Structure formats: structure tokens, C-alpha cells
Amino acid sequence: MYDAMLAETITITGHEGHQIEAYSARPLGPGPSGGVVVIHHMPGYDEPSKEIVRTFATHGYNAVMPNLYHRDAPGASPDDAAAAGRAKGGVPDDRLIGDVAGGAEYLRGLTSANGKTGVIGYCSGGRQSVLAACSLPLDAAVDCYGAFVVGEVPADFPMKARPIKHLIKSLSCPLLGLFGADDKYPSPEQVTELEEELKAHGKTYEFHSYEGAGHAFFSVNRPAYRVEAAMEAWDEIWDFFGQYLS
């Protein structure tokens, strides 16, 4: 079986028709392949996040990651762009929805696409993954320790995000939640609150929490990385997307 991928920086049409930078990776086989929009974490559009995009291509998915900070600091390093974005209170929700919609449109337009598109996000991107799935027609969504889907943002926190619990009734697709049992944002109590809201609206979901793991346990270049939790969680992702995007 032919095993190769194309990974490259591209331009997609995002919110309000703006042309923004994105990173794409896709297998070079004929398909058909499901699509995954990757939402990067708060530290930004960085090398570890690009590696995640390539990992999806390795597993047979077309994947794209919009640079959510593209407008805030064009051409800047990931760290500087993330700092600029945080100084403005983070990515506005309407802009996020528009940029994810642009990524999904790009994926659906590929000749190897099978027409199914999911979204996954990490950290702030976990909340944004849920937001996108409540706002756009998608086939699957994964929330990796997304803070403030429920629960108020502390006053000293560098985000203007607000909880989106009220949007759960509009969730368009099955949701997979992956959480660290030692996390504070979201705390185990907040995860339970979100689960109760999903149940109340009859949504399809599955949640997994990992003992000994806190926030950012997927981040291989950070002290928070927990290899056992991350590997188990990746297995859940492959099973979940295999069910809904294949």
C-alpha cells in the first residue's frame, strides 16, 4: 500500500472572507478520507501542533489547522502571535467559528474527501471545538481538556471567553471528551456539569478522565505531558473518528 503524505502551509478563506494561513497534511492515496480540523492550543500555531496535523494524515485523514492568530500578528513567531492574541483577550468566538468553517470547507473540497468532517481542539481549542460543533454542521468533535465550556473565567485570566453551556442544545454531532483528573480548568466537577448538560439534551457523547494527568497532558514538549494518558487518549480518538468519519 502506497504510504506518503503532503504537508504544507496553505491559505484558506476564513471568517468574513479573510485569507488566513493554515497548515495542511493529507495522505497521497486516492481516498476516500475523512477530514479533521485541528484547533491549536492557546500557546499557538506551533511545531507540536503541526506534528498533530501530520499524525492525522499518517492515520489516513485529511487534516488542516487554521492559524487562529494570523490576523493578530501576521508573520510573527508562534510565541509572539500567541502573546498578541492573548493581549486582545483571545480569539473572538464568531471569528473562530468562521475560521473552522473555512477549514471544513477546504477539507470537503479535496478530491479525496469522503464528505465527513470532524474537529478536535486542545486547551482553549477544546472549548472552541465544542463551540464549533454547536455552531456548524459537523460529523464528530473532540474536546481535549477544554476550559470554560462550563464555569466562569477568573477575572485575572488572559481570556475574554465566556461559558457556552447554553449552546449544548445545538450540538450537531457526537462529542468525545478527554480530561485530566488533576486539572483545574476544567475541574472534575465542571466535567460532570458538562456531562449532565449533554444528558439533559440527549446528546451522543463519551468522556474519559485520566488519573495522574492535569492540563495539557498531550503536550509532548511540556512538563505536563503524561505519556500513558496521552497514548490511551489517542486510542480513544482513533476509535471515535474511525466510527464517525470513516
Image: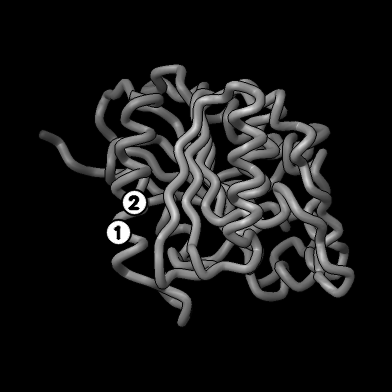
Q: Residue furthest top?
A: 115
- The structure residue drawn at horizontal position 63% and vertical position 68%, both measured from the top left corner, is 184
Please identify the quadrant where the C terminus is shown. Answer: top left
Q: Is residue 83 left or right of residue 63?
A: right
Task: Give how far across and how far down residue 166 sits, in percent.
Answer: 79, 34
- Whole-angstrom CA distance, mark 1 to mark 2, is 5 Å
Q: Which mark is residue 231?
A: 1
Within 10 Å of the Cα at label 1, are there few (<14), some (14-19), or many (20+) other Cα atoms?
A: few
Task: Give how far across and how far down residue 112 sits, in percent.
Answer: 37, 23
- The structure residue drawn at horizontal position 80% and vertical position 43%, both measured from the top left corner, is 93
Q: Is residue 175 left or right of residue 74?
A: left
Q: Circle 1 sits in a helix, a strand or a loop, which is it?
A: helix
Q: Nearer the viewer, residue 5 or 60?
A: 60
Dividing the picture into quadrants, the one containing residue 75 is bottom right
Is residue 192 visible in this depiction of the protein?
A: yes
Mark 1–mark 2 CB contact (< 8 Å) = yes
Q: Is residue 230 left or right of residue 222?
A: left
In the displayed structure, 76 sits above or below 139; it is below
In the displayed structure, 140 sits above or below 219; it is above
Within 10 Å of the Cα at label 2, are there few (<14), some (14-19), or many (20+) other Cα atoms?
A: some
Q: Is residue 100 left or right of residue 180?
A: right
Is residue 22 visible in this depiction of the protein?
A: no
Provide the residue designation for mark 2.
Answer: 234
| Amino acid type for the residue under numbered disc 2 | Trp
How many numbered marks appear? 2
Please identify the quadrant where the N terminus is shown. Answer: top left
